Image (cartoon, helix red, strand yellow):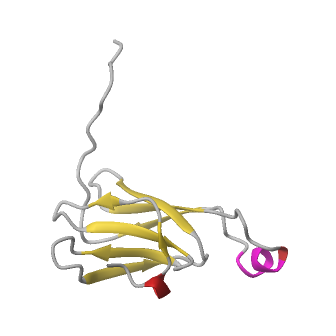
Amino acid sequence: MIPKETGIPEGITIDKNDNLWIPQRGGFGVYCYNPYTGQLIARVSVPVPNPTSCTFGGENLDTLFITTSRYGLTEEELAKYPLSGSIFASKIAPVGVKAFYFGRINY
């Protein structure tokens, strides 16, 4: 169970070890959990309150890309967190898994 004080879970991705990477709205970061034990393994902080989604990318799938939101923030909050709505990238040790393509490929 995700502790209420760390924010509301948003988009999610998985790494090659099956760990869940979950941006948490109001939590200023992406939290990594072991899905079998629920243990918090890692956290990637961002300088904005509302991360919304994340995915692994880069040549070696070792960069975590994190989208964030400005929606619902007051003018004061936007002044305090001017990077809200930005996309952040963080090089991390765990790597993601290659995405599967579900659809028709047109050559």
The answer to which image quadrant residue 32 occupies is bottom left
The C terminus - image quarter: top left
Q: Is residue 90 magenta?
A: no
The answer to which image quadrant residue 15 occupies is bottom left
What residue do we see at 48% from left, 76% from top? 29
The answer to which image quadrant residue 3 occupies is bottom left
What residue do we see at 49% from left, 73% from top? 8
Pick whichever, 8 or 49, lies toward us: 8
Relative side of 39 to 23, left or right: left
Relative side of 55 to 68, left or right: left
Q: Name the residue furthest top.
A: 107
Relative side of 41 to 56, left or right: left
- Image location (x, y in percent) of residue 46: 53, 76
Pick whichever, 45 or 21, lies toward us: 21
- Image location (x, y in percent) of residue 11: 44, 59
Relative side of 18 to 106, left or right: left
Pick whichever, 107 or 38, lies toward us: 38
- Image location (x, y in percent) of residue 75: 84, 74
- Image location (x, y in percent) of residue 40: 29, 83
Main SS, magenta region, reads helix
The N terminus - image quarter: bottom left
Q: Name the residue furthest bottom.
A: 5
* Image vertical order of residue 29 relative to residue 101, above or below: below
**Which residue range is magenta in the image?**
76-81
What residue do we see at 16% from left, 65% from top? 17
